[in-house]
Image (cartoon, rainbow, N blue to C red):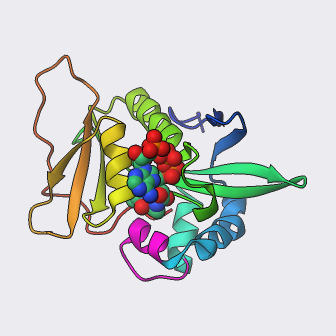
Amino acid sequence: MAPAPGDFAGVLRLPAGADVTLRPVSPDDGGALQAYVRALSQQSRYNRFFAALNELPPSELEHVTHLDRHCELALLAETCILGAPLVIAEARYAFSRERRECEFALSIADAWRGKGIGTLIMADMERRARSLGAERLVADVLRSNEPMKALARKAGFTLADVPRDAKLIRIVKDLAPSRTARPPRVGGAPNLPLAA
Ligand SMILES: CC(C)(COP(=O)(O)OP(=O)(O)OC[C@H]1O[C@@H](n2cnc3c(N)ncnc32)[C@H](O)[C@@H]1OP(=O)(O)O)[C@@H](O)C(=O)NCCC(=O)NCCS
């Protein structure tokens, strides 16, 4: 199969100087991804998945590790500790050709927050969304999730209400500012955030 437009690995250079690898999830990553999710704090898992889960359901884990990669991709950020790779963040996006928008979600391991990884992954999401031809980058975020709202504002997103769901807001970044901006379509948005 030909490589998908956004299907490439890269290196994130943190402001403090360390390098972190960001690469697509492969079918062999189920164990590492599940271990990462289990190690997140309960609050982090709730903010990421909007549910009080301790781990990814097996069906979801199977799905995430076998995406077709053309319009949907899951990514892992890894560092190396004592010679062994350690997953320290994950992200996922799905591109809708019909809406011409890319929806994403991400999480950073609790011990790795505040180091600029979220900012770098959001910038990476933006590059991948542009390469797919998306006109908007969007995510649903719990209204109570102040860190993510602050990160989104800093990254140039606007925050909008989600009709019929007061607990969520939608963050939106227009990727085609030279054209007349179309209002984001939220009516058909999924109820659950993208799993890892
Ligand atoms: C939200 C989240 C992704 C931020 O990741 P991060 O790597 O810590 O973010 P960064 O280090 O790049 O921070 C960038 C900016 O975000 C804001 N921010 C991040 N954490 C914050 C916090 N705890 N309180 C307030 N603002 C915060 C700040 O403006 C920060 O800029 P500054 O460092 O100059 O002050 C991370 O806290 C997380 O994984 N949360 C759990 C999962 C989640 O909420 N996912 C969102 C669902 S889409």
- Residue range highlighted in magenta: 43-55
Query: Magenta stretch containing residue 196, yes or no?
Result: no
* In-image side of 47 versus 190 (left or right): right
- When the figure is inspected, residue 156 is found, relative to residue 141, above or below; the finding is above
Looking at this view, name the residue that lies furthest to the top.
178
| Image quarter of residue 19 | top right
Q: Quadrant of residue 180?
A: top left
In the foreground, 152 or 23 = 152
Depth check: give the residue in front, 66 or 88: 88
Residue 36 sits in which quadrant?
bottom right
Quadrant, the N terminus: top right
| Residue situated in front as seen by the camera: 93 or 162 | 162
Judging depth in this view, the residue of 133 and 196 nearest the camera is 196
Q: How many marks?
A: 0
- Whether residue 71 is visible: no
Compared to 82, does 3 lie above or below? above
At 14% from the left and 59% from the top, the residue drawn is 162
Instruction: Give me the residue at 36% from left, 37% from top.
Output: 155
* Residue 48 location (% of width, % of height): 43, 66
Q: Which residue corresponds to the image point at 56% horizontal and 70% vertical from the top-left?
A: 61
Q: Is residue 4 left or right of residue 194?
A: right
Is 52 within the magenta? yes
* Rendered location of residue 79, percent (x, y): 74, 49
Residue 96 percent location from the top left of the image: 30, 44
Q: Position of residue 41 (x, y in %)?
A: 54, 74
Residue drawn where x is 26% and y is 68% of the image? 191
Q: Quick check: can you spot residue 165?
A: yes
